[in-house]
Image (cartoon, helix red, strand yellow):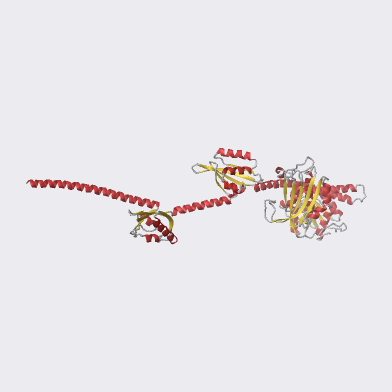
Amino acid sequence: MSTSRKTKQQLLEEIELLKQRVRALEALEAEHKQVVDALRQSERNLADAQRIAHLGSWEWNVQTGETLWSDEFFRICGVEPQSFVPSYDTGMKFIHPDDRESAAEVVQASLEAGEAYHIEKRLLRPDGTVRLVLTEGEMMYDDDGQPLLLLGTMLDITERKQIEQKMRFQKTLLECIHEATLDSILVISESQEWIYYNQRFLDMFDFPEELLQKNSSVDALVWIKSKIVDIDRVIIETEEIYAGHDLESRDEIRLVDGRVIERYTAPVKSNEGTHFGRVWYCRDVTARKQLESQLRQAQKMEAMGQLAAGVAHNFNNMLTAIMGYTGLALAGLPGDHVVTEDLRSIQQSAQRAADLTRQLLTFSRDQEIAPQITNLNELINNMNFMLRQLIPETIGLKMTLNPALGRAQVDPNQIEQLIVNLVVNACDAMPDGGKLTIKSDNFVLKAASSSYPFELSPGHYIVLSVTDTGIGMDRNILNRIFEPFFTTKEVGRGTGLGLAMGFGIVEQHEGAIKVNSAPGQGTTFEIYLPCVEACPEDPGSRFDDDDKPQPETILLVEDEEYVRTLIARLLGRQGYQVFSAVDGQQAFDLLQEQPDLSIDLIVTDVIMPKMGGDELAKRLLVKNPDLKILFISGYSDAIIARQGLQLGYATFLQKPFEPDVLIRKIREILTGEMIA
């Protein structure tokens, strides 16, 4: 019985022990499950991390050949995760054929040296796409020091490399743009260190190579200061700019070599407002300043030209009457009459006044020139006596004329006037005596150059130069010497029109003027005139008083009464029948009222009230296309053309004119022959 009870007790104890063991097993199982779950979660987290980072992992058992790839490794290779059993050989097959050999060499070297490795290579996916990866590997060893596992990672860096390539391209593009721009660029940090500059900046300030090798911002700044005029002012302005911190500024500085530089500066900062420094843009605006100056000069010349043209027109009308009536008076007097010499003096004075109006029109660039092929050496030699009368004894004259000088197509009278003006100015610049040199030479401009007047086109030129050893001129005077009425001479000694007219003469001849001068170093004027080879035939003409005109009928249309009366008397004395009208409307009405009136020639002013000569002529030519017309005007045909009037269909004669010039022109029109 006791044995039975003992057995029961034992059974109960054993049962309790079993329960404890079961609970322990359950606890172990729960703990194991937690570990497994944690491991699986860790694996999932690792897989997610690899997927997000495009980072695959792998291991290769060197002893057994077994290879394991992570899911992301499969995806990077472009295949479904765990879709096949990987191996070393299959891994090598995914490498781009061009990179496969070098990758194998790196792995082999790692095995032999026992060192970690990393290599960039390309993968060729089954779909043909290429991915760029960074692979890193490291060898693990067993307890005996034998290679066991080669572990590694593979990072897909395709997008990163694309971004890097794009950034390199943008950097290169930005550098190319900076080098191609007209601006020099300098970026200075907050600590005053030079962060960036382009080649144009170095060229603008002529940086020597040895200074660049020193790589010192301080030395470079000293060099720049040595290149700037009025550096104290520039330093003060620059300090004010930096004091403003966020200030943007634009100004101009002048370099010691005469160039004008436009500066622009602005702070360099991020979108959040963080300051990195300041950028300076500098542009050489010397050529633009010269153009602006020449534009202002051209505008002044145009304004003064309009004034001069108007004055010359009125003078020409009055001079036509003076010269005409004087000619009529002389024609009616014997040669030994007491007033003959007086009348001739009046005639000569009127002719000089006519020359003055031509100069005014030349100044306005509206006087038609009479160009002819000219040997400028001969022209200068022929002026020798006259020039020596102009030059004081204290000034020596030297002529250096190239005997092989080309020919120029110029108006000799205007070129003579230009030379005289330059010689007179040169003498005035040498009050204590000196040396004056007139030189002629040939010149070929092969390409446009800043050393020569910018308006010159490449080609062959003749250069006339007038050089003195006088007081010279500073930059302020040089900038204004061609302005009308600008003069440095004493009151009463100069009008300020000489060089302005000279400027007009040269431009009419499609040439250019270059001036070199400095205080105390004298002055040289160089005149560039186009060189020509052909010599047009000069028909020559001179009115023969014995060539008496036949009595034809002329309709004279002129709004100035004294000019109309003079021409009517002049034509009447030559035997012409003359009908007169005060303007185009009266002339048109006259012909309408007398339809049977036969007119051989119409002599008409151009610009008149009511109806001008051009409108009258066009109306009459509709009915009589063969009607002969002579236009006369105190304005040049260039000015008339600007009024929108085209007179090319008829002959034009500019006032003032000598009586015989008018008569000869009328005979040529009526006969259709050149009168010699």
Q: In the depicted view, which residue is nearer to us: 476 or 71?
A: 71
Q: Looking at the picture, how far across and down is residue 624, in whole percent? A: 76, 59
Q: Quadrant of the C terminus?
A: bottom right
**Residue at 49% across, 44% down:** 271
Left or right for 526, reference 129: right
Q: In the depicted view, which residue is nearer to us: 600 or 249?
A: 249
Left or right for 625, reference 549: left
Q: Looking at the picture, how far across and down is residue 610, in whole percent? A: 74, 49
Q: In the depicted view, which residue is nearer to us: 65 or 421?
A: 65
The extreme front residue here reads: 144
Left or right for 182, reference 132: right
Confirm whether residue 221 shows in the render. Answer: yes
Work out whether 276 lies above or below 456.
above
Q: Looking at the picture, how far across and down is residue 488, in whole percent? A: 75, 42
The part of the image, by quadrant, that contains residue 238 is top right
Confirm whether residue 559 shows in the render. Answer: no
Left or right for 206, reference 112: right
**Residue at 22% across, 47% down:** 24
Q: Looking at the picture, how far across and down is residue 369, in whole percent? A: 77, 53
